[in-house]
Image (spheres, rainbow, N blue to C red):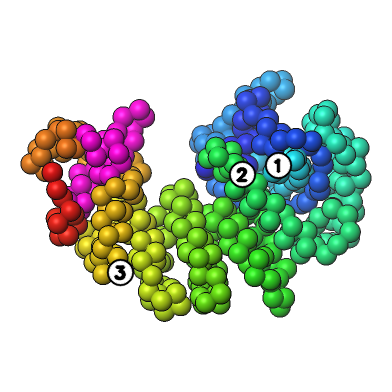
Amino acid sequence: MNHDIADFMAQAQRGEFNPLSLIQGEIRVHSAFLAPLTPALQDGIRQFLVDGSGPLAATVAQMQAQGAPDAVAAASAMFRAARGMCVIVLTGTHGIATIPHLLASELSEDWISQAVAQLGEGVEGGEQLPSLLRELHTQAQRGITWPNLVAAGEGATIDYWLDLTHACVSGADEQIVPQVRARLADVAHWCVAAVAALAQGRGLEGGDVEVLVRCQLLAGAIEAAGAGILVLAEARAESDPDAVIELLAAFVQGAIAGAVEAQAAAWLAAHLERFDAALGTPYDTAQALFRLQAAGAAGVAALQATAVLLAARNRKLMRQDLTREPIWVVRPELAGELLDTNQAATVLGRSATFVAKRLAAGTIPSTRLGDQLRIPAQALASWRTVLEQHGLLDG
């Protein structure tokens, strides 16, 4: 599930994670909203109900600590009853964080009291939280539905979600720790879904579209993000092409971080002609495709075809990327048969030093297993073919 709400909840239940550690400076209550379960949390619940495993398994320990006579049954009952989330949004001097609560029933006064007690001390505006939660309860009683179930003061609901989208992306950009940054993926999911539902018939401003695309990347909505970048490419080809190229680089990073390199590569390959038509056939579009294909352990034919594009557009940059940039890292799930340094040297007919040097620099296919680097045999064969094709496999 990749550091989502369920992971957060499991760690919070074990006392290992403080959501306030995500933000710095003065921390205050910003708002609260009711939302559906995220797909990732739904998957986690299904997994737990099948065999008790997965990121929600730690809930059993929490139930035991609370004195439940049958902790597994208690946890299963809670997850079966879960119908949505109540999310408390906190802001700091830098960034935002959320405190998510599973909801199985309405927001009763007892439930509100418990949520307020869990907020703890040191949060500005905590005294406003009960009224925010009561407002959500009133809205739900009136039949208001997602994504309009928001308690955040005055203003249009779509403006709230757009503001939260900007805050989410800004907070993610400021985080240098991948695990911390990834915890914003769930609020990104809700922001993307809410804006999509509320913006129908209303055109978004260019800045909002760009931030929404970044939020889609954070949420793992790769194809939707790609489509948004393509729209921007065709609209901003002359006015701001660099911003589009920057977003395309973020698309690559987001796909790799979300472990959907192959899907993203397939999508970009299918739309490459439109990007090139809009942007004037730049090197960067072919580079983005090659990076996705290399990370996704694509077949040699696909890599060869894209390498030809790279060479045709800028051979100097192609040589730099293929021989000096760490673009060949493959996830263990995609790696297949693995070789050690000596085995790879034998396959290549080169010295172990030749392989070790490139392995340390990340310029030869590799995958990490714990503290060790290994070389995927199939990716190595593709790497060799591509580099030999362009005379780049020097000593």
Position of residue 302 relative to residue 45, above or below, is below
- Ranked by sequence position, the earlier of labels 3 and 1 is 1
Q: Quadrant of residue 265?
A: bottom left
- Nearer to me, 58 or 245: 245
Highlighted range, magenta: 356-385
Position of residue 172 relative to residue 230, above or below, is above
Numbered circle sitting on residue 313 = 3
Q: CA distance from mark 2 to mark 1?
A: 8 Å
Q: Give the secondary structure at mark 3.
A: helix
Q: Give the secondary structure at mark 2.
A: helix
Q: CA distance from mark 3 to mark 1?
A: 41 Å
Q: Amino acid at mark 3?
A: Arg
Numbered circle sitting on residue 174 = 2
- Residue at the image position 83 percent from the left and 64 percent from the top: 156
> Is 59 a magenta residue?
no
Mark 2 surroundings: few (<14), some (14-19) or many (≥20) residues within 10 A: few
